[in-house]
Amino acid sequence: MSAGGGREEGAAAAVLQLLREQPEPQAEESGAQRFALCLPPGEEVKEVEETIEEMLIRLDEFCGMTDVIRSDTSQILDETIPLIKAKVVEMNNIYAKIDKLEAFVKMVGRHVSFLEEQVLQAEGNHSTVFHAVRKLLQSAAIPSFKNKHTPAAQHTYDLPKLYRTEDYFPRNYVGTRYQSH
């Protein structure tokens, strides 16, 4: 055995002797401290201490990030979600109004189409009767009727039962809504 080998064995024996002589580890004594006692002094101990310090710093950063995440989550749960729920209720009311307006517009469109057909039919009936009377009078060659406009027989028109705008948009609502501008 060399002298260096004997010293190492002697140092290891001394460490083992110290460990045996020490009382049971206290609750506050950490595993890192016990580990440090087992290592020979020198560069290795410094490397282990630096590594442990670096890991503690990273653990601290991690704990800080989890605290930020917890506080953000709490803020979202306590403040943002109730606001979103209120907006959802508000939007559902708006969607219901839009659906009603769409139904109203379709109904008005059907009524307008119906009235337009009746107007075209009335125009066709009126122009046909008017032209027939005019041609008849012109062919009779009576000079006094050529320049005079003879009214055709008056037809009365009965307006079909349609919607009333006031039923859907009360006058007091429409008037106050636009007077504020």
Image (tube, rainbow, N blue to C red):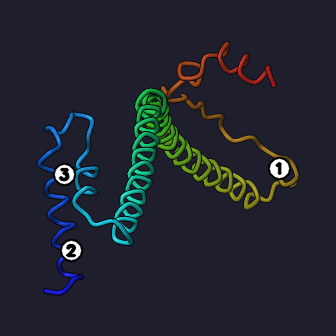
Question: Which residue bears the numbered disc 3?
Answer: 18
On the question of residue 30 being in view, the answer is yes
**Looking at the picture, does residue 74 appear above or below residue 53?**
above
Q: Which mark is residue 153?
A: none
Q: Mark 2 belongs to which amino acid? A: Glu
Marks 3,1: beta carbons within 8 A: no
The picture quadrant where one finds residue 166 is top right
On the question of residue 100 being in view, the answer is no
> In the image, is 166 to the left or to the right of 96?
right
Q: Mark 3 belongs to which amino acid? A: Leu
Q: Mark 1 belongs to which amino acid? A: Phe
Under tag 2, what secondary structure? Answer: helix
Q: Earlier in the sequence, mark 3 or mark 2?
A: 2
What residue sits 57% from the left and 32% below the top? 157
**Looking at the picture, does residue 95 appear above or below residue 165?**
below
Q: Earlier in the sequence, mark 2 or mark 1?
A: 2
> In the image, is 80 to the left or to the right of 153?
left
What residue sits 65% from the left and 53% below the top? 127
The picture quadrant where one finds residue 142 is bottom right
What residue sits 44% from the left and 54% below the top? 57
The percent coordinates of residue 49 (x first, y second) are: 38, 60
Q: Nearer the viewer, mark 2 or mark 1?
A: 2
Q: Earlier in the sequence, mark 3 or mark 1?
A: 3
Question: Which residue bears the numbered disc 2?
Answer: 8
Quadrant including the N terminus: bottom left
Say which of 72 and 158 sits in front: 72
Q: Residues within 10 Å of mark 1 (few under 14, many from 20)?
A: few
> In the image, is 14 to the left or to the right of 136?
left
Q: Which mark is residue 145?
A: 1
